Amino acid sequence: MTIFSGLSQKAETLRKRLGLSYEQILGIRFAVNVGISTAIVWSVLQYAQSASPLLAVASMVAASEPEPTQAGKIFRARLINSLVGCGVGLLFLLISGASEWSLSIGLAVTVLISSLVVRIRSMWLQAPITAALVIGTSIVHGSATKGIVDGLHRVAEIFFASLVGLSVSWVMSKFWIIRKGVD
């Protein structure tokens, strides 16, 4: 018996003793995943130059799904739609510079590409949010170059945080096995 299976058996015994359902214990593991992932993301990004740990933590929560298969699907969808949003945002900045109309049209085009071409409905929102970060940062700073640099930093932070959420979810699922339907 490995240490992990021994801990999982103790957790299962405790779950039964407390009368918790599969969903309740999964929720507890989700809370642990989010706590661990937040500590990692916040600590790492606190030392990165001009990082935005708060936005990254919000992204990490979305990728911290307690069931690793679902977490992987979410991560993949977030990554693809983030790349679409980043690509469209960068394209609009290169073509039109930092302007309010480029934000409106860029977000609309991003939604069309995400919904009609990529078609991963669970993360349709991720593409225009990412495009808004890239284009909007340029508008706020009045510089397409500044927006490109800051936007790419934000996308990298989101990717890092989502990867942390996915990794912690996977590790915890191996460490803390929860059997469905065992009551």
Image (spheres, grey):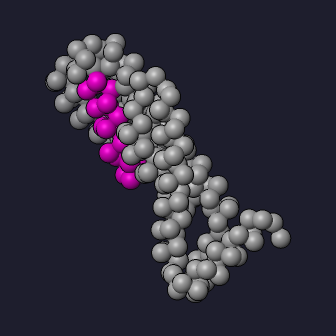
- Looking at this view, name the residue that lies furthest to the left: 101
Side of 147 relative to 6 (left or right): left
Q: Residue at x 54, y 52 (%)?
A: 36
Q: Position of residue 71 (x, y in %)?
A: 52, 54
- Relative to residue 128, is residue 58 drawn left or right? right
Q: Is residue 70 in view?
A: no
Percent of width and height locating residue 15: 58, 80
Q: Is residue 170 visible?
A: yes
Q: Toward the viewer: 98 or 111?
A: 98
Q: Is residue 85 above or below residue 16?
A: above
Q: Quadrant of residue 154?
A: top left
Task: Give the quarter of the figure containing the C terminus.
Answer: bottom right
Residue at 23% over, 35% down: 108
Q: x and y percent of residue 148 in the render? A: 36, 19
Query: Looking at this view, is 65 or 50 the one in front?
Result: 50
Based on the displayed image, in which of its 4 quarters is residue 163 positioned? top right
Residue 126 covered by magenta stretch: yes
> In the displayed structure, would residue 28 be above or below residue 90?
below
Residue interval drawn in magenta: 120-137
Q: Residue at x 47, y 40 (%)?
A: 42
The residue positioned 59% from the left and 85% from the top of the image is 16
